[in-house]
Image: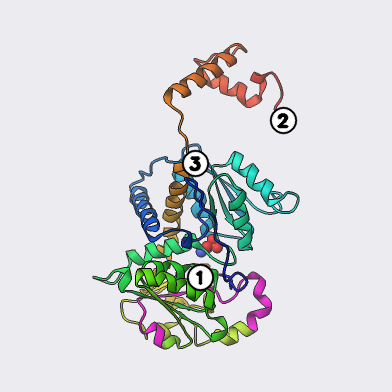
Amino acid sequence: MRAATDVASPVRAQNLGHMKHFIDTQDFSREELEDLLGLITLLKEADYEDAVPPLLHNRSLGMIFEEPSTRTRVSFEVGMSKLGGHALYLKPGEIHLGRRESLFDTAKVLSRMCDVIEARTLKHETVLELARDAEVPVINGLTDFNHPTQAVCDLLTMREHLPAGRTLEDCTVVFVGDRTNVCSSLMFIATQFGMRFIHAAPSAYQAPPEWLAEARSNGAISGGSVSVTSEVEEAVAEADFIYTDLWWWVDQEAEIPARRAAFMPRYQVNAALIARAPEHARFMHCLPASRGVEVTDEVIDGPRSIVFDQAENRLHTEKGILAWLTCPTIKHSSPERHRLHEERIGDYLSRRGWDSTSPAPGAEHLRTGEVLGGTRR
Ligand code: CP
């Protein structure tokens, strides 16, 4: 979505003991990511039978968005609701984030009120800072460097659409276009899972050496590989999955003429380019797409496109990530403690005339605030 040139080698987040943040797939081993994918798959199957367990009943997710979003916002909010919890949409101008209040204070306050935080921030450093100071798990919902929840979703989607008889390790994913945050995350997760990753782009827009070095380290363990090329026609001829992303983003308007000249027409995923790929190759896009720019309608709406399966998988992925990170941090009260508190509060309220055997009037008192003998602020 956004060219990620400023933060080629970000500091990694610290995952502390039982409390983990989800800032970068590189913070996790392949085994941990497999474990997460297992939970995502179980929750997807449960969702298809309308049987998602309320794992996050009564829990709250604070969602910070410094940039607009459709998929990330909706998938986290709906996912939290399906798990029995609640999500709050927090955007600059409506909260004090980093302006009238420091990030440190925001992280501390949200940690006291929410059980988990999701943040889409302009700068990668911002989400790292939040994670450093928060006392609940923080999930990266996209920064200028990466998009790790999208990457997990993409891996799941590729697994669901593998060519017959093949595994991920047998497959090649060709990313056509700019070195965006989505490109970096896909490169890292693909090489962690033993895939061959090719970035096809004009030389000025190819993945930087720092990313390639990290992806090659992944490949040294997994058997995967990474390469860059400007020969997009040759790259797609070897593709099992062809992936593209926007060529420019909201603050890159001044670069549009140069970027259009660099990418168009050679790097547009159109019928002529995709015809060079094997018959079974599938087309992917994280969305939003600029139809007629990086991809044509006939490709994105065509039989090889899996973009809406991919978009739906964001929902299942977010459910899995939310439960995977948050469930281990929840301390459940025993039924005895529940009964004790119910009795204590019932006694308190009945001394003020509330009949605890008829909850509706009691709830009415609570709504007006009269029961506590005062007016609510
Ligand atoms: N793919 C993605 O993150 O989409 P949104 O920007 O709509 O969240």
Residue of label 2: 377
Labels 2 and 3: the sequence-earlier one? 3
Which residue is most to the left?
165
Q: Residue at left 49%, top 62%?
A: 148
Q: CA distance from mark 1 to mark 3?
A: 31 Å
Q: CA distance from mark 1 to mark 2?
A: 48 Å
**Residue 121, visible in the rendered structure:** yes
Q: Residue at left 46%, top 29%?
A: 333
- Helix, strand or loop under label 2: loop
What is the span of residues highlighted in magenta in the rendered image?
234-257
Is 252 magenta? The answer is yes
Q: Residue at left 59%, top 15%?
A: 348
Q: Amino acid at mark 1?
A: Ser
Labels 1 and 3: the sequence-earlier one? 3
Residue of label 3: 85
Q: Amino acid at mark 2?
A: Arg
Ligand 1 under 8 Å from disc 2 Cβ: no
Q: Amino acid at mark 3?
A: Gly
Q: Residue at left 61%, top 52%?
A: 130
| Residue 120 percent across, percent down from the top left | 59, 58
Residue of label 1: 184
Q: CA distance from mark 2 to mark 3?
A: 25 Å
Q: Nearer the viewer, residue 277 or 171?
A: 171
For the residues labelled 1 and 3, say whether their Cβ atoms are less than 8 Å apart: no
Q: Quadrant of the N terminus?
A: bottom right
| Residue 246 percent across, percent down from the top left | 54, 74
Labels 1 and 2: the sequence-earlier one? 1
Q: Nearer the viewer, residue 307 or 144?
A: 144
